[in-house]
Image (cartoon, rainbow, N blue to C red):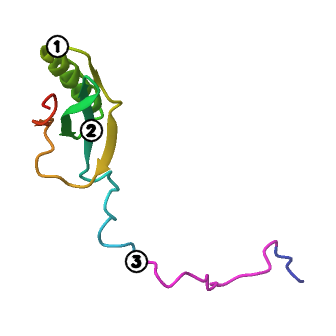
């Protein structure tokens, strides 16, 4: 009498596996945006001549508005016809004084003949 088997294959089969089956010992580092600083700069014009340059450094985009506001307030105190140029934003790497500080460079020659 012969037996009929539903599964004709019996035994242990060799399943191919990749050579690097051991998981890495350390997880890869998490990707971050890095330590960056933004520099915003604008100029104050008094009676058509450049009177001052305002430069601010911060890790937030709000530095653009802050620099423009300082320029406008500085211009109001000078009197006469003043205007601020359109602020420019620069993307920088790591910078030591990136804390929202705004530097003012006054052109002492403006308004003198």
What's the residue at 20%, 55% (across, down)?
94
Q: Which residues are magenta?
A: 6-21
What's the residue at 88%, 83% (across, down)?
2
Residue 74: image location, x then y, percent: 15, 21
What residue is shown with label 1?
79
What residue is shown with label 3?
22
Look at the numbered disc 1 and give the secondary structure of its residue. Answer: loop
Which numbered circle lies on residue 32?
A: none
What residue is shown with label 2?
40
**Closer to us: 112 or 12:** 112
**Closer to us: 31 or 5:** 31
Residue 65: image location, x then y, percent: 28, 26
Please give left or right for residue 91 compared with residue 1 in the image: left
Residue 24: image location, x then y, percent: 36, 73
Graded by Cα atoms within 10 Å as few (under 14), some (14 to 19) or many (20 or more), the crowding at tag 3 reads: few
- Residue lying farthest to the front in this orientation: 113
Residue 88: image location, x then y, percent: 34, 38
């Amino acid at each position: 009498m012969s037996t009929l088997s539903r599964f004709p294959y019996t035994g242990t089969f060799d399943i191919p596996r990749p050579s690097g089956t051991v998981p890495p010992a350390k997880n890869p580092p998490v990707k971050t945006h890095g330590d960056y600083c933004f520099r915003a700069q604008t100029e104050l014009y008094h009676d058509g001549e450049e009177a001052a340059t305002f430069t601010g450094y911060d890790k937030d985009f709000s530095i653009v508005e802050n620099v423009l506001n300082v320029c406008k307030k500085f211009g109001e105190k000078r009197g006469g016809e003043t205007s601020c140029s359109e602020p420019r934003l620069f993307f920088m790497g790591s910078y030591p004084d990136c804390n929202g500080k705004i530097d003012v460079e006054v052109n002492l020659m403006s308004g003198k003949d």
